[in-house]
Amino acid sequence: MEIKSVKKLTDYKHLNLFSINYQDRENCGKKWIFSSRSKYLNPLEKKHTNPDAVVIVPLHVQEKKLVLIKEFRVCLGGYQFGFPAGLVDRGETVTQAGKRELYEETGLSVTKVLKKSPAVFSSSGMTDESVSLLFVQCRGKPTNRFNETSEDIQTIMLSRENAEDLLSDTNTKFDVKSWIILNTFASCVVI
C-alpha cells in the first residue's frame, strides 16, 4: 500500500474532508475520502500523540454511580447515550480539557484523575480523529446551565443495575466507547 497524494476538499474550522489517492497491494490506483480535525493541509503529517478530543468516564463519589449523558446528536436525528466529551483546545492538556468539558456538560467537578489512555481511534475507516479516555472521580450536583446553545444534554447517574437495564433496551443509541465501558461496568465492576 502506498499513498500517492492527499487533497483537502473543504475548509471548515473543526472538521474537513480529504481525498487520498493510493495504490493497493496489486498496484491498482484507489481513492479514499475521510474526515479530519487536522489543521495540516496533509493530515497524514500529523503526529497522533496528542489526541483531538477527550472522553471523560466519571464516577460520582458520593452517589457511587457512573455518570453518563444523554445528548441530542444531529447526525443521528435523536438522542445518544455517551460520556461527556469535547475537543482539546490549543495549549490545553487532556486533563485540563477533561475537567473543563465535564463541568461544562454536567456541572460536576473532577476530584481525582484515575487513568488516562493514549490517543485512540474509534472509526479509522471514516476519520483520523483521536481521543483520550480520562477516567475520573467527580462530585457535585448535575446541571445543564453551562451547556452551549447548540447542546441538549441530560446528565444521568447509573448504578450497575440501571446500566444493565439501559443496555438491554434495543432502541437506545450508544456511542461505541460508552457501550463497551457501560457493559463492563454492568457486568463486573464493584463499587
Image (tube, helix red, strand yellow):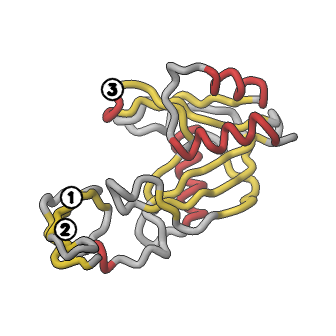
List the residue tagged with mark 1: 33
184 to the left or right of 50: right
- Marking on residue 20: 2
Task: Give the camera-side residue of 175 and 2.
Answer: 2
> Alpha carbon of mark 1 to alpha carbon of mark 3: how far?
23 Å
Q: Nearer the viewer, mark 1 or mark 3?
A: 1
Say which label, 2 or 1, has the lower sequence index. 2
Residue drawn where x is 46% and y is 37% of the image: 147
Q: Which residue is mark 3?
A: 77
| Image: 112 above or below 60 | below
Q: Are marks 2 and 1 in contact (CB under 8 Å)?
A: yes
Q: CA distance from mark 2 to mark 3?
A: 29 Å
Three-letter amino acid code at the position of disc 1: Ile
Q: Amino acid at mark 2?
A: Ile
Q: Position of residue 88 (x, y in %)?
A: 46, 62
Give how far across and how far down residue 166 sits, in percent. Answer: 64, 24
Q: Residues within 10 Å of mark 2 (few under 14, many from 20)?
A: some
Question: Upstream in the sequence, badge 1 or badge 3?
Answer: 1
Q: Amino acid at mark 3?
A: Gly
Question: Where's the N terminus, which quadrant?
Answer: bottom left
Residue drawn 31% across and 80% down? 45
**Mark 1 Cα within 10 Å, few/some/many (few <14, many 20+)?**
some
